[in-house]
Amino acid sequence: MKFNGSIWKFGDHVDTDLIIPARFLNISDKDKLARNCFGDLRPDFPKNVQQGDIIVAGSNFGCGSSREHAPVAIKTVGINVIIAKSFARIFYRNAFNIGLPLLESEEAVDAFSEGDMASVDLNSGDLFQGGKRFIAKPIPGFMMEIVRAGGLVDYVRQKGFV
Amino acid sequence: MSMTITEKILALHAGRDSVKPGELVKVNVDLALANDITAPLAFRVFDELGADRVFDPDKIALIPDHFVPNKDIPSAQQARIMMKFAHRHRIKHYFEFGKSGIEHVILPEKGLVVPGDLVIGADSHTCTYGALGAFSTGMGSTDLGVIMVTGKTWLKVPATIKLVYEGRLQKWVGGKDLILFTLGRLGVEGAVYKTLEFSGDVIKDLSMDQRLTMANMAIEGGAKNGIFEPDEIARTYIEQRSGRKGHYLTSDPEAHYDNVIKISVDEIEPQVAIPHSPDNVHPISVIGPVGLDQVFIGSCTNGRLEDLRVAARILRGRTVSQGMRLIVIPGSSDIYKKAVQEGIIEALLDAGAVIGPPCCGPCLGGHMGVLAEGEKGLSTSNRNFVGRMGHPKSEVYLSNPAVAAASAVLGRIGSPEEL
């Protein structure tokens, strides 16, 4: 699975209230959630993000609430992968469950800037930008299976609950 | 093999003699819960899996608490969806309007969690039930939907950080201050993927309400779960509320811990988390005069009877400062009623408080007390990220209920000692 896209860069401890504020949790319509993704922090984001863009962030991305609306909003706006220094654990699990893969690499995050074009190879963990190559921590086998299936629901449908 | 209490509970539910940190295990779930904002997505997953019944209607709890009494039309639709699912599938623990409360207040109160249980909730503060000696953690709606069908989930066994609290608590210092102090030390990612095991002589004397407050905020350090070994205090609490026996497990003396942190409480003052992170913690004596527009006493962290009692003790015979909005929300119908009977509600009303219906309310900026641009609020809840309680340009401070009550009178952040 390979992705190319333009980078949107965020800092450390981006919490789920920033990703989707609580006032939008009365809806489960994905498109409405997407329209309000990062709406308070970066109003330009929902307007300008393109299908295939990549989020690059610091440590502890997705901390705070367990709201699945957060990775759903990010995936629906068109983000195919998030690269961060580290992820909060409920967000990590939720993202894979809905088929949004996550990669961890401190060096890549330090090297990448907003607006750069980057390529990601999910199987190898290779991250390319401007001629430089970084290797992300390998995605655990079980999480890869979930992502390959398209998310937890598809995984369970295909394999039963293993 | 020597194990921590968390490892023992996971081994028990995985049908294994022992487990080690880092292993992936498949476990049976004793109780699965969701609320009005997380349940609709879980129901969608339930339908996508083609299920026609839940794995066990007695092992699911559905609690309307976040945006009820219905905040607006979309929230009303969500609450209705949950009510219909609960009725259709004969969910035993669905809390009807008027008999409900905040999920993490009402479930312990009703004896639905006993020591040794494995609890999964579609809410990050599900870690609260670790106070009862259960393994309890938050997940998302998709995981919850799968659990509702299968009754099982997978988990990576966490390593444990042991926290040992020693010494003597100062006046006005309780569970909220201990956990805030600890978060200040660990940081918001200091316990990621790990268990926080709360222990020490100080812990042995803490009431269940105080323990629930501490376990509630384990997630703010990134922890997978927080846990207390169940003791006589736990046993008394449980036996008054549940007919189930439970497993009173303890950590083996030779159990391995990633870290053992000793915290001396003698010098710990009431703590305040300042904007915009729950780990931005400082002792009350160094907080300057921060003027406040609103004080909120309530939430799954500090909405219990002991919290209301201490607030009433400080507010009785006093009034809130000019322009102050004091909002007090009892965590459940039972707590509300007891507070009325004890004269707490009257004292709060006389002081100028507005009393809200049992719900999460202002904690997450939903309703019942949202902050406007430029406003500052002090809250007994658990998070103060940017925009948490309203406008992105508002600020939230976190404290214990005694400091909150005193601050409502002073009109600024301050200690009960100043009154």
Image (tube, coloured by chain):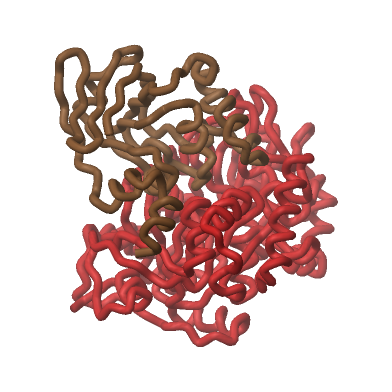
| Identity of the residue drawn at 64% across and 27% down | B391
Residue B7 or residue B185, whichever sits in front:
B7
What percent of the width, then of the height, locates residue B157? Answer: 29, 63
What percent of the width, then of the height, locates residue B203? Answer: 42, 68
Image label count? 0
Look at the image and give the colour of chain B: red
What percent of the width, then of the height, locates residue B329? Answer: 72, 53
| Identity of the residue drawn at 23% across and 59% down | B22
- Quadrant hosting residue B137: bottom left
Instruction: Please indicate, yes or no, whether residue B416 appears anywhere in the rendered image.
Output: no
- Quadrant hosting residue B301: bottom right
- Quadrant hosting residue B224: bottom left
Residue B96 or residue B348, whichever sits in front:
B96
| Identity of the residue drawn at 22% across and 72% down | B255
What percent of the width, then of the height, locates residue B142? Answer: 49, 52
Relative to B286, say whether B180 is above or below: below
Q: Which corner quadrant holds the N terminus of chain B? A: bottom left
Look at the image and give the colour of chain A: brown
